[in-house]
Amino acid sequence: MVPTILPLKIVGASVQRLRKRLVGPVYLTFYGDGATIVIGPNGAGKTSLLRLMHGLERAAEGKVSWNAPAKEARTRQAFVFQTPIMMRRSVLDCIAYPLTTHGMSRRLARAQAARAATEVGLGDALEQSARSLSGGERQKLALARALIRSPDILFLDEPCASLDGRATREIEEILARTRDEGTRIVMSTHDMGQARRLADEIVFLVRGSLLEAGPAGSFFTTPRTAEARAFLNGEIIE
């Protein structure tokens, strides 16, 4: 069995832009199982934290490290954005793309992509243009594309923010199955119902600061900070 790249350790790391601190310093460790949901008010630093962990943002201070060399760690993680990029290709070829870019033959990559598409409910749209898909279908494609190389950890930045209830439910079902099959999930959301449904752990940010991190059950029943209690009550936190 190939060792996992986890745990992911974040030690005193922060993100800064134009001398403004967007998030941090953060101290967190992510082990191999479950789903962590990152929540907080608008501007809390949720996206910046995800980008820092994935390597899309460089730590201005502190350290982000994996249980593997950095080059290997980059190939064994994936990121799904709120608005995924759709290439000018068919659904099948979009999903196969990560495999062909890593040297797999087009024939074998397309065969694996067809199975991945079917698993997310796109089996009837293989030859359809990716850019013609609905919002929910685009996120399914993005998930299939992200998962086709079996990453150890999957980051998602509010993937259901613009979706209707049915599409959200379908995406959540895929994510729950992915988590249960062993892929570590770290996801931001503004939907507290979604956080309650999916989270094993909660990371709570306000104004770039990490105020709480721990089991979801205790966060939702007995939050430790006044800010968390206010946030869960629907109050505006500035």
Image (cartoon, grey):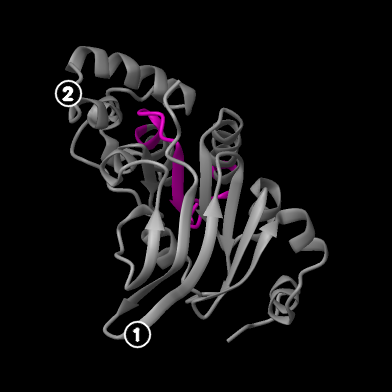
Residue nearest the viewer, comparing 70 with 151:
70
> Which range of residues does the magenta coloring cover?
145-167
- Residue type at numbered disc 2: Gly
Residue 157's spot in the image, x, y percent?
A: 45, 56
For the residues labelled 1 and 2, the Cα–Cα distance comes to 41 Å
Res. 142 image quadrant: top left
Quadrant in which the N terminus appears: top left
Q: Is residue 43 above or below residue 164?
A: below
Helix, strand or loop at label 1? It is strand
**Label 1 amino acid?**
Lys
Left or right side of 166 for 58: left
Q: Is residue 159 visible?
A: no
Residue at image point 48% right, 23% down: 119
Task: Give the class, few, some or many, for how many residues have Cα within 10 Å of label 1's Cα (few <14, many ≥20).
Answer: few
Say what secondary structure mark 2 lies in: loop
Find residue 51 and report its image quarter: bottom left
User: Residue 121, image x and y in percent?
Assistant: 48, 27
Q: Earlier in the sequence, mark 1 or mark 2?
A: 1
Q: Circle 2 is placed at which residue position?
A: 103
Residue 32 located left or right of residue 148: right
Does residue 180 appear in the picture of this structure? yes
The one of 127 and 217 positioned closer to us in this rendering: 217
- Who's the residue at 46% across and 60% down the image? 10
**Residue for point 54% across, 42% down:** 167
- State the image coordinates of residue 204 (x, y, percent, origin top left): 61, 67
Residue 161 colored in magenta in the image: yes
Name the quarter where the C terminus is drawn: bottom right
Residue 20: assigned label: 1
Classify 10 Å Cα crowding around label 2: few (below 14), some (14-19), many (20 and above): few
Q: Which mark is residue 176?
A: none
Pointer 1 with pointer 2, Cβ within 8 A: no
